[in-house]
Image (spheres, rainbow, N blue to C red):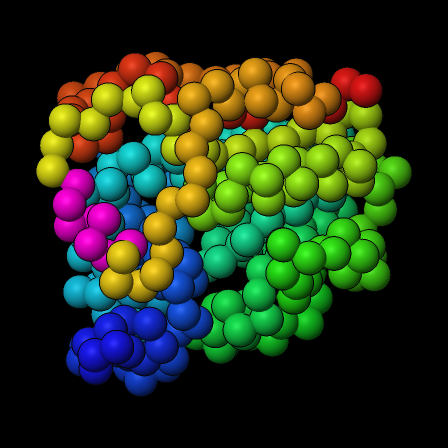
Amino acid sequence: MGELDQARLGGAPPHGDGRRLPEGVGLTAVGVALARARESARDDRLFDDPYAKAFVDAVGDETVAGMKIFGGYIALRTALFDDYLLAAARGGCSQVVILAAGLDTRALRLDWPAGTRVFEIDLPDVLAFKYDVLGESTEPTRGRTAVPADLREDWGAALTAAGFSPQAPTAWLAEGLLPYLTETDNDRLVDRVGELSALGSRFGIEVVNPTTTYRGDVSGFKRMQSSINAPWRSTQPDPSGWLVRHGWRPADAPTMEELHLRYGREAFLDERTGTGAGGLVTAVREG
């Protein structure tokens, strides 16, 4: 492996501040943070993430330049799941679990109802990097609990040990996660989520829907995925049907066009963000 690849995987690029970022998929989280930072700087922004720029400054944006073409999509995805989580919390889900939380900052930036507990599950080095950049401890604070765990292992035990209650309705989020797992791992994960979910729990997922039409050049993004050893390992052409088979009733599954219209971004619907079927779905646990 060359020095450039080593820098992309485990070191800071030339314009970063010297902090080391976890390898592989952890690096894609910087690309998502870059999109959140750029959206937050817009006059017509869909949300405000005052923390995102710090992650980009720590690592540098040139390493994830291939993800810039999806910036508009990431902004819409973020807005959709922000709305989903807040509605779920205000509707009785006193617990929120963000799977593979990466550099997600919703625990800090959203206006949660009093008493809401937000659990962030990810690998220990990813969580440590995030809170080192933010200048905060990974100890529970402001209703947030970091849960170091590998989602391919018995993460449920670590979650319950951190204070999670399977008897309380929960809002779950799997954003930017499922495409990086195999189909078998995804089935195992959603089944474990179901086992830990009381009636009335909610689940938000993102998958790569292969029926979505992308006409633009995404070769730069694919090169970046290859360079950091973070390829997509699964797709799901029927995410709603998949959730139904695992005991969840889909509640919201917008197409790409509907997503753009919902947030007033129809003028930005183009080949880079895709058309037709989407891969974002929210669902309810009904037994």
Residue 110 in view here: yes
Q: Nearer the viewer, residue 91 or 159?
A: 159
Secondary structure mostly seen in the magenta stretch:
helix
In the rendered image, which quarter is residue 242 located in?
A: top right
Residue 38 in view here: no
Q: Look at the image and give the residue range highlighted in magenta.
A: 218-225
Q: Position of residue 150 (x, y in %)?
A: 63, 60
Q: Is residue 97 above or below residue 18?
A: above
- Return the residue found at the far left: 217
In the rendered image, which quarter is residue 53 located in?
A: bottom left
* Lateral position of residue 274 relative to residue 152, left or right: left
Circle count: 0
- Residue drawn at (39%, 52%) of the image: 49
- Quadrant assignment for the N terminus: bottom left
- Residue drawn at (79%, 40%) of the image: 196
- Residue drawn at (69%, 57%) of the image: 153
Q: Nearer the viewer, residue 201 or 1?
A: 1
Q: Nearer the viewer, residue 109 or 231?
A: 231
Residue 142 is a magenta residue:
no
- Return the residue found at the far bottom: 18
In the rendered image, which quarter is residue 192 located in?
A: top right
- Residue drawn at (45%, 47%) of the image: 180
- Return the residue found at the far right: 167
Q: Is residue 123 above or below residue 212?
A: below
* Lateral position of residue 41 relative to residue 108, left or right: left
